[in-house]
Image: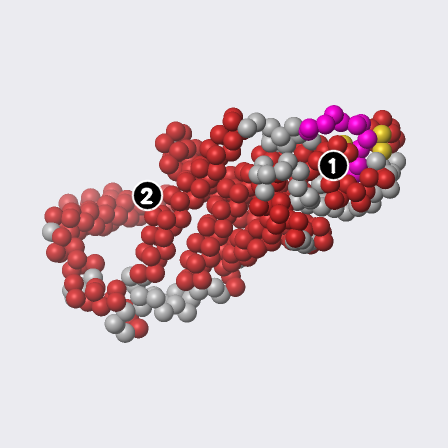
């Protein structure tokens, strides 16, 4: 007894630091014991699947899971998040995933790839549509600076949204394999961020552009003739066209219908804080993807015709002017309206260098 009382004082910590060290040792030992018990339970559960099921959801049978899936159970088997009436196992989510992965994604990729292939084949066989007569050197103002700035801003946003959207749909099959998970994770995060923030800006500017151009894109009878004759490729070479031909008007109304549907569905997806239901979000996603993939495919034709496919078309949207020969061949009805406003290209260059007004039609907004 004396020995015990003699040794006891030596075991008592002599300072606060020693007491704290003792407490941390006790916590560490307790933590090790708790972790060992947890791992033991996991090991037992893995070794015995029936025990795992009993531990995770005691009393749940296969028949009860079928009831949960079919919706035959009461509120205790429902998803309680945000006024949801969904089952714990939501069949509509599986339906959405099936539509997106089995139909929308593959057929969208086929549409874009097939359009690109056809355009390439057409270019290799037919080539660029050159002017049939020499240029006169007299120019007509076709697009004001404001409309050109609006067009290129909308076009840039469109291309950025198309690329980021394609990355969100198909990028994992390409870039993840090429660059690995780290680079892929950065790419997908950046694509999602850019897509979500640029989408609303694109939507607002698209509406402004459509409103600005609606007068020039009202369909007329000669537009139908232009479409039937393929812009002059079928039958006679020259077909009547006003400021916008039949193909340009078709593209305008595709943007005014499908394009605005894509924008509207994008807003539904971008702002989930307006109490949309899960079904609404799923259908908005499908509509958004189908419309966006379709417009992306069609836009390849618009881009081709406005760049490589037609001589002088790109000049109109970069400089704002077209040669009167180009106007006669592609928009003869419009040319008859503005032919008295032609300006020698030397005068246009001089006015641009001096910063003065470009001419009588310089105030035209479209």
Seen at 16% across and 55% down, the residue is 52
Seen at 82% across and 45% down, the residue is 363
Name the mark nearer the viewer: 1 or 2: 1
Name the residue beneath numbered marker 1.
Answer: 328
Disc 1 crowd rating (10 Å Cα; few below 14, some 14-19, many 20+) is some
Compared to residue 213, the image places residue 326 above or below, namely above
**Residue 276 or residue 363, whichever sits in front:** 363
Seen at 65% across and 53% down, the residue is 221
Q: First in sequence: mark 1 or mark 2?
A: 2
Q: Secondary structure at mark 2?
A: helix
Compared to residue 346, the image places residue 215 above or below, namely below
> Is 108 positioned to the left or the right of 246 in the image?
left
Disc 2 crowd rating (10 Å Cα; few below 14, some 14-19, many 20+) is few
Seen at 69% across and 38% down, the residue is 330
Picture quadrant of residue 352: top right
Q: Which mark is residue 192?
A: none
Q: Position of residue 200 (x, y in %)?
A: 59, 51
Q: Is residue 157 visible?
A: no
* The residue positioned farthest toward the front in the image shown: 235
Q: Position of residue 24 (x, y in %)?
A: 31, 45
Give yes or no for contact between labels 1 and 2 (Cβ–Cβ under 8 Å): no
How is the structure coloured here? Answer: secondary structure
**Residue 294 or residue 50, whichever sits in front:** 294
**Does the magenta segment cover residue 144?**
yes
Q: Is residue 359 visible?
A: yes
Q: Which stretch is magenta? A: 131-145
**Does the magenta segment cover residue 173?**
no
**Residue 313 or residue 258, whichever sits in front:** 313
Compared to residue 282, the image places residue 303 above or below, namely above
Name the residue beneath numbered marker 2.
Answer: 21
């Amino acid at each position: 007894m004396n020995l015990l009382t003699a040794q006891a004082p030596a075991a008592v910590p002599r300072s606060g630091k020693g007491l704290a060290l003792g407490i941390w040792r006790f916590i560490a030992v307790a933590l090790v014991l708790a972790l060992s018990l947890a791992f033991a339970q996991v090991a037992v559960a893995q070794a015995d699947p029936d025990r795992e099921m009993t531990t995770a959801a005691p009393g749940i049978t296969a028949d009860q899971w079928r009831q949960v899936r079919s919706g035959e159970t009461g509120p205790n088997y429902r998803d309680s998040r945000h006024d949801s009436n969904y089952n714990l196992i939501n069949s509509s989510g599986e339906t959405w995933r099936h539509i997106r992965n089995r139909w929308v994604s593959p057929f969208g990729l086929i549409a874009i790839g097939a359009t690109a292939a056809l355009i390439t084949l057409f270019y290799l066989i037919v080539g660029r549509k050159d002017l049939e007569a020499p240029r006169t050197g007299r120019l007509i103002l076709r697009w004001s600076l404001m409309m050109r700035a609006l067009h290129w801003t909308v076009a840039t946003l469109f291309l950025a949204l198309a690329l980021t959207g394609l990355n969100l749909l198909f990028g994992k099959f390409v870039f993840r394999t090429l660059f690995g998970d780290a680079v892929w994770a950065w790419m997908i995060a950046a694509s999602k961020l850019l897509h979500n923030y640029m989408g609303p800006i694109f939507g607002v500017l698209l509406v402004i552009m459509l409103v600005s151009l609606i007068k020039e894109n009202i369909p007329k009878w000669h537009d139908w003739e232009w479409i039937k004759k393929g812009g002059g490729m079928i039958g006679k070479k020259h077909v009547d066209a006003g400021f916008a031909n039949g193909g340009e008007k078709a593209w305008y109304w595709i943007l005014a219908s499908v394009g605005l549907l894509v924008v509207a569905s994008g807003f539904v997806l971008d702002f989930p804080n307006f109490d949309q239901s899960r079904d609404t979000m799923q259908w908005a996603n499908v509509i958004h993807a189908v419309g966006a993939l379709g417009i992306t495919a069609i836009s390849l034709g618009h881009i081709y015709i406005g760049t490589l496919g037609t001589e002088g078309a790109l000049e109109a949207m970069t400089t704002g002017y077209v040669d009167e020969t180009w106007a006669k061949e592609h928009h003869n009805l419009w040319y008859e309206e503005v032919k008295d406003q032609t300006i020698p290209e030397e005068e246009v260059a001089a006015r641009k260098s001096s910063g003065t007004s470009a001419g009588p039609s310089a105030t035209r907004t479209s």
